Image (spheres, helix red, strand yellow):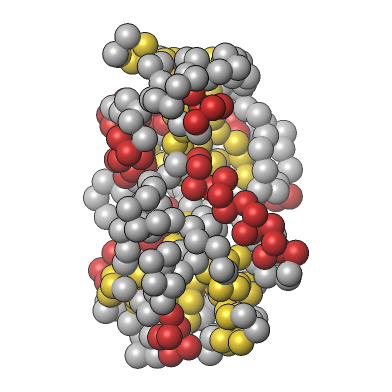
Amino acid sequence: MEKKNIDWGNLGFGYMPTDKRYVSNYKDGAWDEGGLTEDANVTINECAGVLQYAQTVFEGLKAYTTEDGRIVTFRPDLNAERLEQSAKRLEMPVFPKERFVDAVIETVKANSAYVPPYGTGATLYVRPYLFGTNPVIGVKPADEYQFRIFVTPVGPYFKGGVKPLTIRVTDFDRAAPNGTGHIKAGLNYAMSMHAIVTAHQEGYDENMYLDAATRTKVEETGGANFLFVTKDNKVVTPKSSSILPSITRRSLLYVAKEYLGLEVEEREVPFEEVPEFAECGLCGTAAVISPVGKIVDHGKEICLPSGMKEMGPTTKKLYETLTGIQMGRLEAPEGWIHPVE
């Protein structure tokens, strides 16, 4: 399929409607067969469960053009598993894993003209989501749901190159110990809006959330997991039941151990340990790794030895290795890459 006439090199990270999207409806205890539609609009009742009680979960992944010209997606089966866990936690019907992966591939294939060419720095962002559609006025789960996938071409998350971020330790809590921090629910992101807006107003790029119970341990930011590198080159990520299990983080830990031969630890990270680390990064789908150069704790600055000019050396190796796998420059572990065509 001939590519769309898009200035791929100057794409921002925003929404651009494409030709097709996938829709499936749940009613009377079962999902319909689903399929593609050209209609980008969602029509629901004013009393729909999603509007009244925020019964919605979502995922985010990407499709790429590899070095040899193939269009592929990266580990969509893990997105399917995470959506399943999110749906169960909010008492929503599970969209079957096999159908999820097939629907992702079908949607990307139908919009292959929008998949940016290799080397442009751009990718196709894929957004699956699930929400309650029928009227619900009492506080209870909806009876009917819709699962949808749309795609949109996006440019690099950081225009003009990656620059280390300055983040703050926030007084807001992201998630309670037995709450919903471990799932990808829309409500988690709604509650983080005020914290990120005020952080930006104060000149910070992001927030560091500490655990809500003791406020002594590092958890994550509003939309990414933390990854630290010790001075003896060990890769450490925080462990907590209220942290979202990032697919990018899990992939980076595998890469660190199996490709780079580094020691890896997934454990609780006391905040008092942060000044001892050599490097820090935020990992997620959008940017893979965003380096952190400075952490400000109520006026007290923690400056990472990696500095404010570029990624630290180990973080950079992790980034280059994982993006090399995604783009087909390096051999991928079995099952990580799902070809579209």
Q: Residue at x 37, y 11 (%)?
A: 27
Q: Where is residue 264 in the image (x, y as percent from the top left)?
A: 28, 75
> In the depicted view, which residue is nearer to us: 114 or 310?
310
**In the figure, 324 relative to 113: above or below?**
below
Q: Residue at x 39, y 72 (%)?
A: 214
Q: Position of residue 192 (x, y in %)?
A: 57, 53
Quarter occupied by residue 140: top left
* Picture quarter with the C terminus: top left
> In the depicted view, which residue is nearer to us: 96 or 173?
173
**In the figure, 298 relative to 51: above or below?**
below
* Horizontal side, residue 12 vs residue 218: left or right: right
* Horizontal side, residue 35 vs residue 265: left or right: right
Q: Residue at x 56, y 18 (%)?
A: 47
> In the depicted view, which residue is nearer to us: 72 or 53?
53
**In the figure, 241 relative to 129: above or below?**
below
The residue at the far top in this view is 28
Q: Which residue is drawn at 26% across and 79% down?
A: 263
Q: Where is residue 32 in the image (x, y as percent from the top left)?
A: 36, 11
* Horizontal side, residue 65 vs residue 338: left or right: right
* Picture quarter with the N terminus: top right
